[in-house]
Amino acid sequence: MRILVIGASGTVGSAVVAALADRHEVVRAGREHGEYRVDITRDDSVEAMFEAVGPVDAIVSTTGSLFFGPLETMRPADFNIGLQDKLLGQVRLALLGQHVLRDGGSITLTTGIVSDEPIRQGANATAVNAAVEGFVRAAAIELSRGVRINAVSPTMLTESQAIYGPFFPGFESVPASRVALAYVRSVEGPQTGRIYRVW
């Protein structure tokens, strides 16, 4: 298969590339790194990327920014960061990407454990991740040509524990290599409308 991974240079993206590259042709894209550059907050940038990449069998998104901060001081503009980037950015990849996928292709988006397990200073992350999961379940019943869509919801990464550990007291971390297996299931398996939780 020919698989496009957006966010391929990140911790999760790198692990996904490593898990897929020995069996598939992996095309890497990202905001600052990769064979192709893309800003997922802009239609024109995403359309230009898809045009340059050409037809693919799978689209994997391991990207998306969120806002973390106290609800007491959060402003609508802060909350909008996650809406425009991780939510609408990934929805944009799916809406525009469905047309460059070959028949039977797949789309895999990324959410996170806070969709089900809220944390302090994570209201934006919880809302955005839950919305992405809702989109995946709804899109799965409308996509045509056998195209599938799923999401992977990881807990805190072991590799990121030093940075994010204080936000996740008592949470067990998982290594990125284990999280990557869920993306492999989504790309190579038959399911659609699934949220693969790696907790």
Image: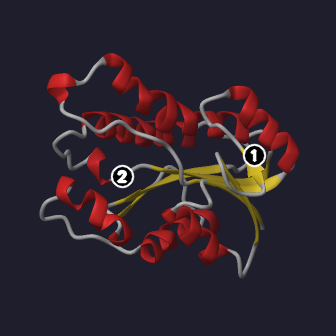
* Quadrant of the drawing holding the C terminus: bottom left
- Residue drawn 20% across and 39% down? 121
Q: Is residue 141 visible?
A: no
Query: For mark 2, what is the residue?
Result: 112
Q: Which mark is residue 145?
A: 1
Left or right, 162 with reference to 70: right
* Image height of 1 relative to 22, above or below: above
Secondary structure found at label 2: loop
The front one of 8 and 190 is 8
* Image height of 73 relative to 34, above or below: above
In this view, the residue farthest toward the bottom is: 22
Residue 92, by quadrant, is top right
The front one of 178 and 102 is 178
- Residue drawn 46% across and 54% down? 194
x and y percentages locating residue 181 in the rendered image = 50, 73
Left or right, 146 with reference to 170: right
* Quadrant of the drawing holding the N terminus: bottom right
| Other residues around mark 1 within 10 Å, as few (<14) / some (14–19) / many (≥20) | few
Name which residue type carries label 2.
Gly
Secondary structure found at label 1: loop
x and y percentages locating residue 5 in the rendered image = 66, 57
- Residue drawn 70% across and 42% down? 38
Q: Is residue 109 visible?
A: yes
Residue 70, by quadrant, is top left
- Distance from the alpha carbon under mark 1 to that under mark 2: 28 Å
Query: Which label sits in the foreground, 1 or 2?
Result: 2
